[in-house]
Amino acid sequence: MPTTLVQNDNRPDQPFTIYDDTGTVVNLTGCTVKFFFRNDNSHIVVNLAHATMTLTDAANGIVKYVWDNHAPLAPFDLATAGEYTAEIEVTFPDGTVETVRDTFAYHVRQEVETTV
């Protein structure tokens, strides 16, 4: 079941805990974690310029993604209603990269005030 969000919003933040294939929390200390958010219709990743997530508790694998609504050169994350798929990519301090195996489904519904 997809997470439902509303077009043009920039809350709530999206928290995640990162686990490895055995179910153990991944220590993200020194890592860069990115959240890629792709429109399923256009296949465009809408947040490339600001995909980096915030490490909220790196040792316990906890990160969050803050939705952007101030992108100066491109539409912000939730500007277009529709279906989206997201994935999380971790770059470790040694430069190796691992993409979290599961993807995340989102439904961005049209906001009511844009339809009047």
Image: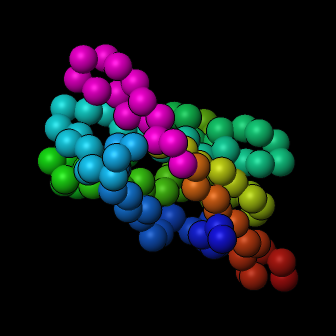
Q: Quadrant of the N terminus?
A: bottom right
Q: Quadrant of residue 90?
A: top left
* Image side of residue 32 versus residue 102, left or right: left
Is 49 included in the stretch rendered in magenta? no
For this orientation, the residue located farthest to the front is 22
Pinpoint residue 25: horizontal percent, then vertical percent. 26, 50
- Asked if one can make out residue 50 in the rendered structure from this viewpoint, the answer is no
* Image side of residue 94 versus residue 42, left or right: left
Is 90 included in the stretch rendered in magenta? yes
Pinpoint residue 9: horizontal percent, then vertical percent. 57, 68
Q: Eyeballing the image, is 34 above or below 64?
A: above
Q: Residue shown at 64%/59% (left/top)?
A: 105
Foreground pick, 96 / 65: 96
- Give the colour scheme of this rendering: rainbow
Magenta region: which residues? 89-102
Q: Residue shown at 69%/66% (left/top)?
A: 107
Q: Eyeballing the image, is 95 above or below 46?
A: above
Q: Quadrant of the C terminus?
A: bottom right
* Image side of residue 85 versus residue 36, left or right: right
Pinpoint residue 112: horizontal percent, then vertical percent. 75, 82
- Asked if one can make out residue 38 in the rendered structure from this viewpoint, the answer is yes
Pinpoint residue 48: horizontal percent, then vertical percent. 55, 34
Q: Residue shown at 74%/80% (left/top)?
A: 113
